[in-house]
Amino acid sequence: HPFQPFAGNKSQRKFRTKTKVLTRLKKGDLVYVSVREVDLFDGAPTLDLEKYPKLQGAALVMQEGMIRAMAGGVENRFYNRAISAKRLMGSTFKPFVFSAALQLGWSSTDLLDNRRNVFAFMGNPYFPRPDHHSPFDFVSMSWAGVKSENVAAVWLLYHLTDQLTLPQLRELATHLKMSRKEGESYQEFSSRIRDSFGIRVTRSTLERVAYDRAVKNLEADFLFDNLAEEYQQLKHLPFGLNFDNYRANQIIALKNRKLKNRQRVELRLRTAILNRNFLVLQSVQKALRQFREYFYAQQQLELAPLDYFDTQPVQRPEGTFFADKDGSLIFLRSSKRKIPDSWQVVSDQELRLRLDGLLPGDETIFWERILLNGYVSSYAMTQVQQQMEIERAALSSSKPYSLEVLADVRDYKVMLGLQYLIKLGHQAGIASNLQPVLSFPLGSNVVSLAETVRMYETLVTGIHHVTQLPEDFTQENHDRADQDGLSIIERIEGPGGEMIYARATSTEQIYDQGVSSALSNILENTVHYGTGYYARKNVRLHSEEIHRQKQLEKLNLPVPLLGKTGTANDYRNASFLGFVPTGIASEGAALTLQKGYTVGVYVGFDSNLPMKKGNTRITGSQGALPTWSSIAEAIYSLEGIGDKLDPVDLVFNSIGLKYPDTHQVFVPVDPKQGGVIIDGRGARQALIPPAEPSILSHGRTTRAGVFKARRNFQPFWLNKK
C-alpha cells in the first residue's frame, strides 16, 4: 500500500517533522501501517503510519475441538504465539482446580479459608499472596473464582482430597500409581513412594498425623460442649512441624538492610503466621501450668515463716495475662507480639482477686477457660493432647507406609491431589508437562494458549474432542501428528475435487454434566459479578436490520458469558479465557451451551518482561478482556443471535443462560460476605439462574432452611464411555 502521511493526531504530526526519518524511506521498504478508511470509488486506502509494538499476544477461537480463528501475534510469519508460545496463564487455572475438587467430593458452595497462611509441603513453606485486598476471611468456592482469591484457591488444593473416604482415596491412589501394585512388597512400595514422590514418614510426621486425627475425632465432643467456634479455630490451626526453622529463616531475611518497606512488612507478617500453630500453643500451655503452680506456691509462702525465703527463693515464670473487651482472660508466654488496643493487662493481684471470688471447685474451670495467645482455650489444648495419646497408640499398630497411615499424611494427600490434577489436565487437552507444585492454581505451569483454550472447552462442555488420524498413517507420522495443526484443517481436496482428507473427531467425556454445569456457573458469576465484568458491561447483540438494531440498542441487554481472568506473577502475562454460548433455547430469550465457542486471549512481551511502569499494572481484565469481549461480540454478530431471539421476549425478559437439567438448584448467596450461603432463603430448582446472586449446586434444603450439598466421587475415568 502507498504511504500517505497527513496532518492527523499528535503522533502523526510529530512524525511529519522528522524529515530525516522520512528521507530514509525508499520504494519497496516495508512500513507498519493501519487502514484509516477505504475510498468507495477506487478502493484506495488511506493509511496511518504506526509504531511497531513490542507488546505481543495471541487470540484463538475453538468450537467442538476445531480452531475457527486464530491470531498468532501482531506479526506471526515466523512465530505463531497462539500455538507455539508457552506462557504463564495465571489465575485462569483456578477453575481447573475447582473442577477437580467438584469431582472429588467438594461443592461450589463450600467455604474456603482465605486468610493469609503458610502451607508446608515436602519440608518447604509456601506463603501465597493475594494480588488485591480481600475483606473476606472465608469465601465460597464460587466466589473464590468470582473475585480470583489466591489464598483460598491454594487452600483448596492443599485440602483437595480431604472429602474422600478411605475406599475412595484408595481408588484414587490406585489409578495414580500411588498405592501398592499387585505383587509389590511393602519394602518395594515404601522405597518407590520415597524415591518417586518424595514422601517420607518419620516420627515427626506421625506426630502430625496424630494431631490431625485428634482434631478430626474431637469434632462431636466440641459441638456437644457448645464449643463450635473454638473447634473451627483448631480445625484451621496448623500443627507447626519445622515452623521454628521457617521462622528463623524469615528473621534472618529481615536483617537485610537493602529490603524495601513492603518486603519488611511481608516478612513480619510471615513470622506472625508461623507463630500461630499447635506446637507454639503447647509451649504456652506448659508455661500457663508453670504459672499456676507458681501462683499457688506464692499463696503458701505467704503463710510460711519469715526465714523461709532465705532457703526457698521464688522466681516468677515468664508470661503475661490480659483481658479482652468481653472480659475473657488471655495468657501470652511472651508479650513481644503486637497487642490489640482492646486488651488490658491483668496484674497478679487482679488475678488473685478473681480467684478469691470463685466458688469452691470452680478454680479448675477458671484456668481451663484461659485463652492461649488469645484464640484457643487451655481446656481445648488439654482435650487435643489427651486424644493424641489415643491416636499415637493406634498408629503404633500400623506400618508407617500402609495406606491407612498415608491417608492422613499431609504430604501424601497433597501429592495425590497434585498428581490427579496433572492426569486430569492431560485428559482435558494439555500436552505440556505439568509440575506438582502448590502454586498450581495460580498458573505456575507454562502452557500454550491453544492448550488452555482446549482445556476450557472441556471444562464447560465436559467433552474433550480428539482429532482422529487417517488409518493409513505410519507409526512415524502418527508420533509426529500435531493436534493443533489437525484442528485447523477441515478437509483437503485434490485438483479434481476428490477428497484426500476429511477431519474426523472422537469425543471423551471427562466431566459429567453436573460438574460442568457447576463450573460453568462459577465462570458465569465471574463475568456477572467479578473480574470479568467488563465483558458483561460492553458485549451487546447487533443486527444488520436497521429497525431490529435500534430495538437492541434501546434495550441494551447484557448477554450471558463465561470466563476467567489471569495475571501471571509480576504482571508478565495477562490473559482471559472463556466461553461464548450461541445455542438458542426452544422457549424464552435464553441461550444454551450447545455449539458454543471457546475463546482465549493473552498479551505479553516475548521477552517475558513485566507489563508495568510507574503505577500502571496490566492485569488480565485490563490487557486481555477488552480484546476477548470484541471477539465475543463478533461471534454473536457472525451467528446472527440478535436476529434469532424473539423480540417480544427481549422486551419483557433479560437474556438468560439455560443449563441442562441435572436436577440442579440455585442457592442464594451474599456477595458482600464472600458468596456465603444465605440460610433460610432456600434453594430454587431451575434451569436459568435467578436475577439475584446465586450458586448452581446439587443438594437439598433442610426444614430449618439450611442447604446440604450433595457430594459425589466422580473422577474422570468414571465418566469415559
Image: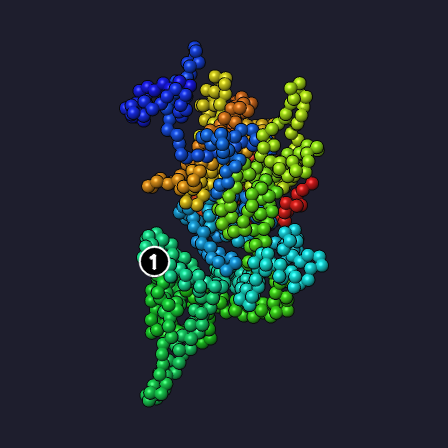
371, above or below 359, in the image: above
| Residue found 46% across the figure and 50% down from its top | 151
Q: Nearer the viewer, residue 421 or 109?
A: 421
Residue 455: x and y in percent read 56, 39
Left or right: where 500 falls relative to 601:
right
Q: Which of 205 and 292 is in front in this view?
A: 205
Left or right: where 510 falls relative to 128:
right
Q: Mark 1 points at which residue?
A: 256
Residue 530 in view, yes or no:
no
Rendering quarter of residue 374: bottom left
| Residue found 43% across the figure and 10% down from its top | 41
Residue 334 in view, yes or no:
yes
Q: Residue furthest left?
A: 17
| Residue found 59% across the figure and 49% down from its top | 420
| Residue found 36% across the figure and 53% down from its top | 263
Q: Which amino acid does label 1 sit on?
A: Asn
